[in-house]
Amino acid sequence: MGSRSDNDLAYIAGFLDGDGSLMLQLKKRRDGKKKWRFMATICFYQDSRHELPLSWIRKVLGIGYLSKRNDGMSELRINGFKQVRDILKKLMPFIKFKNEQAKAMYHATDILTKTQDTKSLKQLVGYILKIQEHNYVSKRKKTKKELYSLLGLTP
């Protein structure tokens, strides 16, 4: 992580609470034995005319990539299980409104940095559902049954 103070971390946590999201997704995979992979993301959003705070957050955290979307918004995305876990560990004392999502994401990314078994895959499904429950999304969410089926956890 780049240079940071508690004030910087508190500001970043507040930004995440207001204009950010935590996403734990199961993505289709074209290569390898497994047909699916997990993806953990912290994302910050801002109108592209005012994207300077996103550059500052990237500099402070020392990670992420900044992109402009077609709808006039810019976003800073941070991917990777270890990176997301380590950043959340530092931000969690300051997160107020997305606390439940942050805890679920932290535990999920901790599991994802290790080898998974059936028990841990079921825990990951629970964390996906917990995060989805608190996120606003325009697309339909997968159910527990659908997630279990994708991961081969059904009898």
Image (spheres, helix red, strand yellow):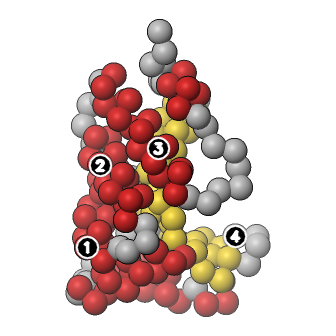
- Per the image, the residue denoted by label 4 is 69
Q: Is residue 15 above or below residue 34?
A: below
Residue that label 3 marks: 128
Measured Cα–Cα span from mark 1 to mark 3:
22 Å
Q: Residue at x 58, y 85 (%)?
A: 51
In percent of width and height, residue 110 lies at: 26, 47
- The residue to which callout 1 is attached is 93
Q: Work out whether mark 1 precedes mark 3 in sequence or the reverse, and give the earlier one.
A: 1
Label 2 environment density (alpha carbons within 10 Å; few <14, some 14–19, many ≥20): some
Judged by depth in the image, the label closer to the viewer, 1 or 4, is 1
Identify residue for label 2.
107
The answer to the question of whether label 1 and label 2 lie on touching residues, with beta carbons closer than 8 A, is no
Query: Which three-letter amino acid code belongs to the residue tagged 2?
Result: His
Q: Which amino acid, mark 3?
A: Ile
Please tell me which of labels 1 and 4 falls first in the chain: 4
Q: Which mark is residue 34?
A: none
